[in-house]
């Protein structure tokens, strides 16, 4: 084709020459030596006293009597063992909830302009602003025995479960309906041939009622039994999820805004459906930001004390998470045990720190992203 | 395939991006949407592609109403202003994406991608990532990606906007040639009138969400429909005058006869392009305006001269051929007389 002949290939962009090595004191704005040394050593001393010494001390205290004792302190006590298991149960559940919510909220805020968008952005930050103790109290007020829902939950709490599970199931089916609906109206078959406003309410209502009735008839859930939320694992999950609520969304919103929607629109224009667009284009662009958010969320969830303290009720071997267990061991003057559990948490914190520093470089920076031209130009 | 747009309107908040726009793009044309920023040309392009939803009006492709169709079903290629290449995919994956999501066989995809890479002369860089390409190369990849699925219509949003002058020139010629070969109906957005005139068969001039004029480049340039088009398409001198006996009269001097008949003594804006300004040393009757030469810029293929009318202190820009300039031997400070070889008159109710 003759169109090929037009181009004269421009020379390959040469890599920029390395910046000249700066000589010491080359910069006339350098402060005098005593200022530089003074400030540096002040910072190092403060960090040393406030951070390095305590952290080292935790490991020193934990391992003071040898690795064998340390190990026994961790696993021999059944209550300590249970606290580790409980944290390992509560944290993943809270994490998954916050990932789903975080991605959905970030998507909504970064991609759409809807009434209440600013309010939602502000509300996402609320758990950062509220004291964790207050957050815990809030759940006690709602779900506790003396709380608003307390009498109902105590008498026949599980009665609500058929409705909850059915509603959840219908919601998932609605999402699937839209995900797999062929965008081209000519290509729609079966259920998708009927208009959505007719199919969704009818099918949704039928399935919901069916789900509730079947569960009630079969007696899936125990009757006339108390459903414990406060002073039980569900309460711990709620409190942990609430406190770590902002991490994923907060991390994703600026990234999604910086990346812009042009690539996603390009994918749609090239024939991708919503699902393909999300997996092929959106996920690769936000994945490091998402991992970063998950790591921060995870670290905070594992270490959460205040909110969990209020809703847990401190039942040893039942509702003590690791931070609560540390406090209890400390109160019992079991210092080696206390430091052993503390060292596990500290180790997780250090790992988080390393992962965080590694990841920061991989996240698409705001400055390099193409500016999405606003429509109307 | 032809595209028809009927009565399309779009508002962003209180801003009218498009105000009842109708447009017919005939099959196989290369059409330019020309206008200043904020004139609605990009919005119109995005509405045709289905990336933006119009508040009202219809979009038809070959007589078929596609207003309700989603972007993916329209089979309309779109080249984004900043290319929107998938940054985590190589050049070949980018180009093949449209075929991949349409589940074409791998063999066919490889073949088509190879073909397109040859067409854009980037076969050597197939494994590179977008960040490793220059602006012009990215633009060509974006074009190849849009062409891979063999769209019926190709839309380009400011295709040369972010490129330097030389690459831009090359790409213009290339786009023109490409269009001659594959004959896909194409619409591109630009704010550069030179670019629109050089590349397009048809030009649509837009302003404030409305279409001001539609026609071939020659029609639009030679017969601007209104003061906005006249003013937007290059430099122009505007005089305040009136029409007397079929002549445009400015400060007592009859500059020339406007192309169209106008009412007598109507207050009018008289437009004269710099290259249509005639400079003489002698006054010819009452047909010329006394002026002083302020500045002469002889660099370039035409000599640019800045003058000031002695009566009104108005600045006048003129362009002379080098031959005419040598004949006149002008220098700054000379007193001369100005008339026009061609004038256009619009009734004064414009705002500039």
Image (spheres, helix red, strand yellow):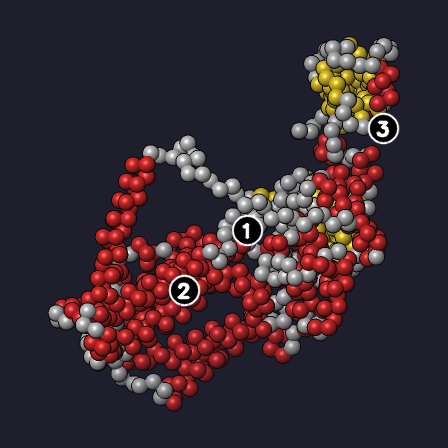
Protein chain holding label 3: B
Task: Identify residue for label 2.
Answer: A294
Residue lying at 80% horizontally and 12% vertically, measured from the top left: B336
Disc 2/disc 3 C-alpha distance (Å): 72 Å
Q: Is residue A2 visible?
A: yes
Q: Residue B236 vs residue A192: left or right?
A: right
Q: Is residue A176 left or right of residue B127?
A: left
Q: Earlier in the sequence, mark 2 or mark 1?
A: 2
The chain letter for the residue carrying disc 1 is A
Residue B233: percent from the left, percent from the top? 74, 34
| Residue B297 versus residue B120 in the image, above or below | above
Does B242 sit above or below residue B51?
above
Residue A338 location in percent, x, y?
19, 69
User: In front here: A194 or A138?
Assistant: A138
Mark 3, secondary structure of its residue: loop
Q: Secondary structure at mark 1?
A: loop
| Residue tagged 1 | A369
Q: Residue at x 85, y 10 (%)?
A: B282
Q: CA distance from mark 3 to mark 1?
A: 51 Å
The chain to which mark 2 is attached is: A
Name the mark on residue B259.
Answer: 3
């Amino acid at each position: 084709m003759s169109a090929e002949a037009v181009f004269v290939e421009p020379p390959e962009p040469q890599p920029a020459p390395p910046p000249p090595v700066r000589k010491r004191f080359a910069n006339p704005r350098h402060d005098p030596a005593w200022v530089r040394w003074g400030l540096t050593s002040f910072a190092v001393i403060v960090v040393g006293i406030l951070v390095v010494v305590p952290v080292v001390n935790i490991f020193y205290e934990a391992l003071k009597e040898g690795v064998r004792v340390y190990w026994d302190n961790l696993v021999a006590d059944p209550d300590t063992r249970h606290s580790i298991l409980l944290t390992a149960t509560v944290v993943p559940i809270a994490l998954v909830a916050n990932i789903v919510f975080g991605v959905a909220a970030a998507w909504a805020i970064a991609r759409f302009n809807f009434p209440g968008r600013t309010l939602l952005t502000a509300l996402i930050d609320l758990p950062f602003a509220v004291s964790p103790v207050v957050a815990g109290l809030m759940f006690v007020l709602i779900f506790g025995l003396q709380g608003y829902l307390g009498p109902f939950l105590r008498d026949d709490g599980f009665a609500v479960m058929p409705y909850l599970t059915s509603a959840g199931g219908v919601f998932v089916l609605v999402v699937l309906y839209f995900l797999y609906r062929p965008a081209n109206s000519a290509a729609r078959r079966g259920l998708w041939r009927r208009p959505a406003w007719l199919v969704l309410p009818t099918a949704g209502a039928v399935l919901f009622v069916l789900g509730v009735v079947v569960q009630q008839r079969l007696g899936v859930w125990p009757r006339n039994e108390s459903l414990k939320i406060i002073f039980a694992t569900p309460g711990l999950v709620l409190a942990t999820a609430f406190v770590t609520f902002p991490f994923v969304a907060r991390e994703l919103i600026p990234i999604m805004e910086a990346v812009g929607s042009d690539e996603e629109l390009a994918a749609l224009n090239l024939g991708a459906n919503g699902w393909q667009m999300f997996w092929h284009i959106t996920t690769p662009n936000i994945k490091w930001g998402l991992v970063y958010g998950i790591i921060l969320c995870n670290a905070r969830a594992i270490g959460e004390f205040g909110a969990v303290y209020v809703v847990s009720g401190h039942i040893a071997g039942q509702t003590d998470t690791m931070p609560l267990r540390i406090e209890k061991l400390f109160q019992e003057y079991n210092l080696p045990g206390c430091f052993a559990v503390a060292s596990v948490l500290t180790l997780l914190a250090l790992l988080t720190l390393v992962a965080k520093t590694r990841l920061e470089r991989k996240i698409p920076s705001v400055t390099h992203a193409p500016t999405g031209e606003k429509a109307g130009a | 395939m032809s595209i028809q747009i009927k009565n399309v309107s779009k508002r962003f908040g209180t801003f009218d991006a498009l105000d009842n726009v109708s447009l017919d793009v005939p099959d196989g044309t290369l059409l330019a949407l020309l206008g200043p920023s904020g004139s609605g040309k990009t919005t119109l392009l995005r509405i045709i592609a289905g990336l933006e939803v119009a508040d009202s009006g219809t979009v038809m492709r070959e007589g078929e109403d596609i207003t309700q169709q989603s972007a993916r079903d329209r089979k309309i290629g779109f080249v984004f202003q900043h290319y929107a290449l998938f940054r985590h995919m190589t050049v070949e994956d980018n180009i093949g994406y449209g075929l991949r999501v349409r589940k074409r066989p791998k063999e066919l995809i490889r073949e088509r991608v190879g073909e397109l890479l040859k067409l854009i002369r980037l076969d050597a860089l197939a494994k590179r990532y977008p960040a490793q390409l220059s602006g012009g190369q990215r633009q060509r990849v974006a074009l190849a990606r849009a062409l891979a699925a063999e769209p019926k219509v190709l839309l380009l949003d400011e295709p040369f906007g972010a490129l330097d002058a030389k690459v831009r020139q090359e790409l213009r010629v290339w786009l023109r040639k490409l269009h001659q070969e594959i004959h896909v109906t194409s619409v591109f957005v630009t704010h550069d009138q030179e670019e629109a005139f050089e590349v397009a068969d048809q030009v649509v001039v837009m302003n404030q969400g409305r279409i001001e004029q539609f026609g071939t480049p020659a029609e639009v340039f030679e017969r601007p429909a209104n003061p906005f088009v006249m003013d937007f398409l290059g430099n122009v001198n505007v005089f305040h005058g009136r029409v007397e006996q079929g002549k445009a009269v400015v400060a007592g001097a009859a500059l020339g006869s406007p192309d169209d008949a106008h009412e007598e003594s109507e207050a009018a804006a008289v437009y004269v392009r710099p290259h249509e300004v005639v400079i003489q040393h002698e006054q010819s009757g009452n047909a010329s305006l006394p002026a002083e030469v302020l500045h002469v810029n002889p660099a370039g293929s035409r000599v640019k001269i800045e003058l000031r009318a002695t009566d009104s202190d108005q600045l006048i820009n003129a362009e002379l051929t080098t031959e005419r300039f040598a004949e006149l031997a002008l220098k700054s400070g000379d007193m001369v007389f100005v008339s026009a070889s061609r004038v256009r008159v619009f009734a004064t109710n414009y705002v500039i």
